[in-house]
Image: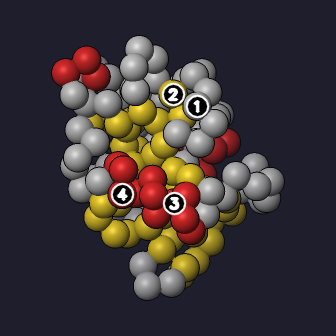
Amino acid sequence: MNMYYFVSELKTFAEAQLYCRATYTDLATIENTDDLDTLQTDQVTYTGAWIGLMYPLTIWRWSYNEESLVFESWADGQPNNYGLGEECVAIFNNGAWFDLYCTDSRYFVCYDGENHAQSLFIDGWVKTFIINH
């Protein structure tokens, strides 16, 4: 199980990736429905938070381990523009993924890559509460 950290600071994908790598492990990797369920929350409303999924060359890959995408949770009609510059992915609080321009500024989700109880920390000034599944 992964421990996730929602960071309510606006950053580009590259800036968010640097932050997550310096502070935790990397941007979030979502490998299964348990991971996705943890990130679906009504506790915080956001319109897209970066996760670690990107389209660097010819296939969607995870930032942390560069593994190819297996589990997916695309919104209807997504990805819709990955060949024309929308090469990074954000998750919305309903769990749907959208491909977006990597230069957009968004909140983001980090994870620590360790095995823990499934948790999501909401980060503002400090971690304010935990959601366990």
What residue do we see at 36% from left, 57% from top?
A: 15
The Cα–Cα distance between marks 3 and 4, rounded to whole angstroms, is 9 Å
CB under 8 Å between discs 3 and 4: no
- Of pointers 4 and 2, the one earlier in the residue sequence: 4
Left or right placement of residue 28 versus residue 112 in this view: left
| Three-letter code, disc 4 | Glu
What residue do we see at 51% from left, 60% from top?
A: 20
Position of residue 48 relative to residue 125, above or below, is above
SS of the residue at dot 1? loop
| Three-letter code, disc 1 | Glu
The answer to whether residue 39 is visible is no
What residue do we see at 37% from left, 69% from top?
A: 8
Mark sitting on residue 51: none
Left or right placement of residue 33 versus residue 53 in this view: right
The Cα–Cα distance between marks 4 and 2, rounded to whole angstroms, is 18 Å
Q: Label 3 belongs to which residue?
A: 20
- Of pointers 1 and 2, the one earlier in the residue sequence: 2
* Mark 4 Cα-neighbour bin, 10 Å: few <14, some 14–19, many ≥20: some
CB under 8 Å between discs 2 and 3: no
The Cα–Cα distance between marks 2 and 3, rounded to whole angstroms, is 17 Å
| Image location of residue 105, percent across then percent down | 24, 56
- Of pointers 1 and 3, the one earlier in the residue sequence: 3
| Image location of residue 90, percent across then percent down | 37, 43
Quadrant of the image occupied by residue 107: bottom left
Q: Who is closer to the viewer here, 52 or 31? A: 52
Mark sitting on residue 66: 1
- Of pointers 3 and 4, the one earlier in the residue sequence: 4
CB under 8 Å between discs 1 and 2: yes
